[in-house]
């Protein structure tokens, strides 16, 4: 069965579909020994030999889905050029190569999915699928109703207006506030930048849910495999 080259690469667990497109455009992908730079190129996984940077790739039939409670101070990447700890270092005992689904900042804690299923990664991270992510943000100062309205309506950031968010106050402290924010975009440092924009910088940020998936008591630094119901739920989003 023929499929598009970028879909093959994501299903083979090489990178997300978008990152695979970049690999093709950069001339790092060969099909049957010939460099291919056209994104729509069709390949047959049964008969074609596909290489990335000279390494032959195959579609992994066994998909792995992991939910990690990422600690603060750990990078959401596979490898760091400076040797700093990454989320992959926390997955002791996993032999299959998995990739983070989207990213959490180094200083953000909480729910992170990792998988070798590129199609699912594409679905969860692409804004068109509108998968809701829930964050608990402890912010500086006392947040007033006007600020909550601004967050709900959308904030003009340097990369454009944010989509409407669901926001509620969880706790008011003497000079800080704990907020729950639900957003379906995944822009870089989005929650931090939204809170900065209303004058209430984030002190601590934690992601507690992706869609209906939650940490369910998983301790910081621990991981578990998703169960079949959770996998089916994500595929059905
Ligand atoms: N928003 C942020 O600011 N940081 C994250 O890690 C995730 C969402």
Image: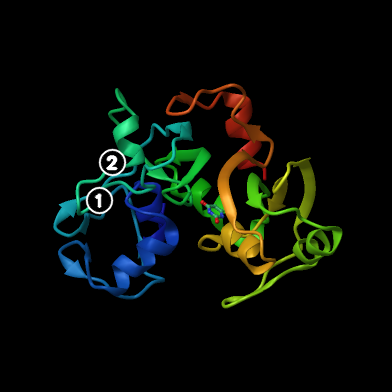
Q: Residues within 10 Å of mark 2 (few under 14, many from 20)?
A: some
Q: Element at badge 1?
A: loop
Q: Residues within 10 Å of mark 1 (few under 14, many from 20)?
A: few
Q: Element at badge 2?
A: loop
Q: Which residue: 52% across, 60% down?
A: 189
Give the quarter of the image for residue 125: bottom right
Q: Nearer the viewer, residue 30 or 194?
A: 194
Q: Which residue: 48% across, 52% down?
A: 102
Is residue 27 positioned above or below 87 on the image? Answer: below
Position in image of residue 161 (x %, y %): 68, 74
Could you tell which of marks 1 and 2 lies nearer the N-terminus? Answer: 1
Q: Locate residue 160 relative to residue 125 in the image: left or right.
A: right
Q: Which residue: 25% across, 55% down?
A: 48
Kindly identify which numbered label has been placed on residue 80.
Answer: 1
Is residue 172 positioned above or below 147 on the image? Answer: above
Instruction: Tell me, yes or no, whether the two marked residues, 1 and 2, touch with CB atoms within 8 Å.
Output: yes
Is residue 79 positioned above or below 233 on the image? Answer: below
Is residue 218 positioned above or below 62 on the image? Answer: above
Q: Is residue 4 visible?
A: no
Q: For the C terminus, give its image quadrant.
A: top right
Position in image of residue 179 (x %, y %): 72, 47
Give the quarter of the image for residue 126: bottom right
Kindly identify which numbered label has been placed on residue 44.
Answer: none
Position in image of residue 85 (x %, y %): 28, 41
Position in image of residue 111 (x %, y %): 54, 37
Q: Nearer the viewer, residue 57 or 155?
A: 155
Kindly identify which numbered label has been placed on residue 85.
Answer: 2
């Amino acid at each position: 069965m023929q499929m598009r080259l970028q879909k093959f690469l994501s299903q083979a667990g090489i990178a997300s579909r978008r990152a695979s497109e970049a690999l093709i455009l950069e001339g790092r992908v060969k099909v049957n020994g010939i460099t291919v730079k056209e994104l729509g190129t069709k390949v047959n996984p049964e008969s074609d030999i596909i290489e990335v940077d000279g390494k032959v790739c195959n579609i992994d039939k066994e998909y792995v889905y992991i939910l990690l409670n990422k600690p603060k101070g750990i990078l959401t990447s596979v490898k760091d050029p400076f040797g700093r700890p990454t989320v992959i270092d926390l997955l002791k005992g996993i032999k299959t190569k998995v990739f983070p689904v989207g990213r959490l900042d180094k200083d953000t804690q909480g729910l992170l999915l990792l998988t070798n299923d590129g199609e699912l990664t594409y679905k969860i991270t692409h804004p068109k699928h509108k998968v809701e992510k829930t964050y608990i943000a402890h912010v500086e100062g006392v947040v007033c109703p006007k600020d909550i309205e601004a967050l709900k309506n959308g904030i003009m950031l340097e990369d454009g207006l944010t989509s409407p968010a669901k926001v509620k106050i969880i706790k008011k402290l003497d000079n800080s506030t704990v907020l729950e924010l639900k957003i379906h975009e995944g822009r870089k440092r989005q929650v931090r930048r939204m809170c900065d924009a209303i004058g209430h910088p984030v002190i601590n940020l934690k992601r507690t849910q992706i869609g209906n998936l939650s940490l369910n008591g998983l301790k910081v630094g621990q991981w578990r495999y998703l169960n079949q119901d959770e996998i089916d739920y994500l595929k059905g989003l």
